[in-house]
Amino acid sequence: MLYLASQSPRRRELLGRLGLPFGIIDLDVPEQRAPGEPAEDYVRRVAREKAGAGLLKVMANPAALVLGSDTEVVLDDEVFGKPRDAEDAAGMLRRLSGRTHQVISAVSLVSPSRERQTVSISQVTFAALSAAQIDAYIGGDQWQGKAGAYAIQGFAETFITRLDGSYSGVMGLPVHETAQLLREFGLEPVPPASRTPVATP
Ligand SMILES: Cc1cn([C@H]2C[C@H](O)[C@@H](COP(=O)(O)OP(=O)(O)OP(=O)(O)O)O2)c(=O)[nH]c1=O
């Protein structure tokens, strides 16, 4: 049985695209970068910790397979997680304006006997943003709960001049890499035509 250890509705939607049934485990793993910890190591560690914490909750099932993931925005080796408030968010967007940053998404899959991980690193270039554009974006709510204070899947796509990498990875779960990881555990994604239709009353 596959479980997604995540509160993120984006991850739920992205994993759903693979056509495999899965359960949800709610958890809250602290995200704190250790001093001097390289950005990629940090993202990998948090993804592993989320999957591991999830597995602890469903350990009673020996067939449990738990997926945990973490996404961070990285600019000049600084990690931009989810903004604390609107001011923090505006500061992040000012820093990202006119520059290319990385979005690192790590995915961990753990069973009681195995653990594997994959990582997707995308390069995202932002156009120069005016103060008015930043203010207007922060006036809405699409930045909330998003690493780097933007969501590519919303209005912020208008800020992006170039993406080199995985769109779904930027959104929180790299779908291609996740499919490959699941195959390593014997789970084959199900194409739409082969899915069992859900009975409607
Ligand atoms: C950059 C970017 C991030 N995000 C989101 C993906 C992640 O949900 C979030 C980064 O925070 P995460 O800590 O990776 O995830 P989360 O706290 O939302 O969910 P959980 O730990 O329970 O799995 O930012 C977007 O939705 N769009 C984007 O363009």
Image (cartoon, helix red, strand yellow):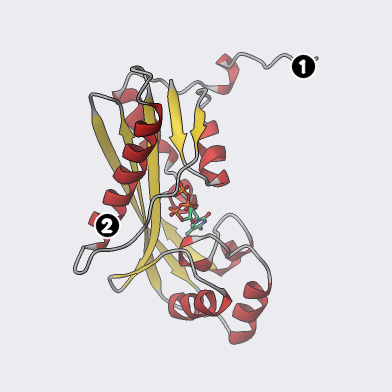
Count the labels in the image: 2
Which of these two is toward me, 107 or 34? 34
**Height in image: 157 above or below 128?**
above
Identify which residue is drawn at 29% across, 43% down: 48
Identify which residue is drawn at 41% across, 20% down: 188
Identify which residue is drawn at 72% across, 14% down: 199
Q: Does residue 165 appear in the picture of this structure?
A: no
Q: Is residue 24 left or right of residue 61?
A: right
Give coordinates of residue 6: x percent, y percent.
47, 42
Give coordinates of residue 69: x percent, y percent.
39, 45
Amino acid carrying mark 1 in the image = Thr
CB at disc 1 and ligand 1 closer than 8 Å: no
Indicate the quadrant containing the C terminus: top left, top right, bottom left or bottom right: top right
* Outermost residue toward the left in this view: 36
Q: Which mark is residue 151?
A: none
Spatial CA span between label 2 and label 1: 44 Å
Which residue is label 2 attached to? 42
Which residue is label 1 attached to? 200
Identify which residue is drawn at 62% across, 58% down: 154
